[in-house]
Amino acid sequence: MSFFAVLFALMIEQLKPLPRDNWVHDTLVGWVGWAGRNFDAGQHRHAIVVWCITVLAPALVACLVYLAIAHYSLLGAFAFDVAILYLSLGFRQFSHYFTDIRAALDAGDETEARRLLAEWRHLDASELPRTELLRHVLEHSLLAAHRHVFGVFFCFITLSALGLGPAGAVLYRMAEFASRYWAFKSRSLDVPANERLITLSRRAFSLIDHVPARMTAFGFAVVGNFEEAVNGWRRDAALWMHRNEGILLASAAGAIGVQLGGEAAPGVTPDRSRTFDVGGNPESAAARGSTPGTPAQAGHLQSLGGLVWRSVVLWLLLAALLSLANLLG
């Protein structure tokens, strides 16, 4: 049943995606901010309490609600799975920027492509060479695809198989959200932040994302150039400051034969009311070097789109087989 929940949620999200500024985002910002204001007094134990309230509590509530609904109606439980997945996934929330940037580059309008990248990631793209512009689009699109689709998918499938409903999707989304929120608050707002909470949130999400990141990278290898993707994973992942991101980007670079890695684009003074949702520290995309491969070209955008969609189909097929085996077993 988890396969059909994912399939229905993806279909609904494609037909009617949540807008960039939506009530779910506003609610989560309010929830995480409320927990920080009321339970964070600067000590390590307070950081643990705040993280548990902001991340584990919503996942537990989702699990309990699912179990309560499933006790009376399996169809209702299925609908609840679909609803939570719809709210947790965000395929179209980033893909429209990717599509618009690609269309602008195909039309020869680099100025518009730079504007769109700056609006999406709040970077200063005005002085980037064309290859660097394309590289940043590729890297940010890969990371967004993982965090908005594959990471949620793997955590949902894993905990759903244990009978916990959509708890995995909520756990992944809230852990990722909390990590971004506290990093953003410390970086962009003139508000003191508990460094222990920032570190805990980042490490907890890195731990939760450990297996999903590697599963996503493995999927890229299977549907792309397997040998080069695996070689890139082994050889180049350490170029990035965050291991999970390095594995994703290095394997994808090998899978489509593109050169990724290098300095992060300079940031711009953010509109602080809107910048948080772009992600964590912009320097996290920086690498100490570049992978082998062809410098980024417009054709690699098409290759990336195909890579992501083939990976989606691959994991959906595997989920379908697991669901079938569960029904027959």
Image (tube, rainbow, N blue to C red):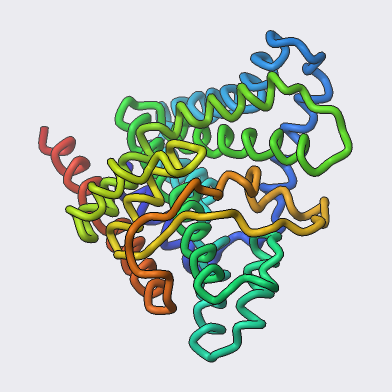
Residue 42 horizontal/vertical position (percent): 79, 15
Q: Is residue 290 above or below residue 216?
A: below
The one of 35 and 98 positioned closer to us in this rendering: 98
Residue 112 horizontal/vertical position (percent): 65, 81
Q: Is residue 160 visible?
A: no
Q: Is residue 117 above or below residue 122?
A: below
Residue lying farthest to the left in this orientation: 328
What residue do we see at 61% from left, 22% from top?
A: 200
Q: Is residue 65 visible?
A: yes
What residue do we see at 68% from left, 75% from top?
A: 115
The one of 34 and 217 positioned closer to us in this rendering: 217
Residue 304 horizontal/vertical position (percent): 37, 66
The one of 99 and 269 positioned closer to us in this rendering: 269
**Quadrant of the image for the C terminus?**
top left
Q: Is residue 37 above or below residue 264?
A: above
**Quadrant of the image for the N terminus?**
top left
The one of 177 and 132 positioned closer to us in this rendering: 132
What is the quadrant of residue 120 in the picture?
A: bottom right
What residue do we see at 18% from left, 35% from top?
A: 326
Residue 199 horizontal/vertical position (percent): 63, 24
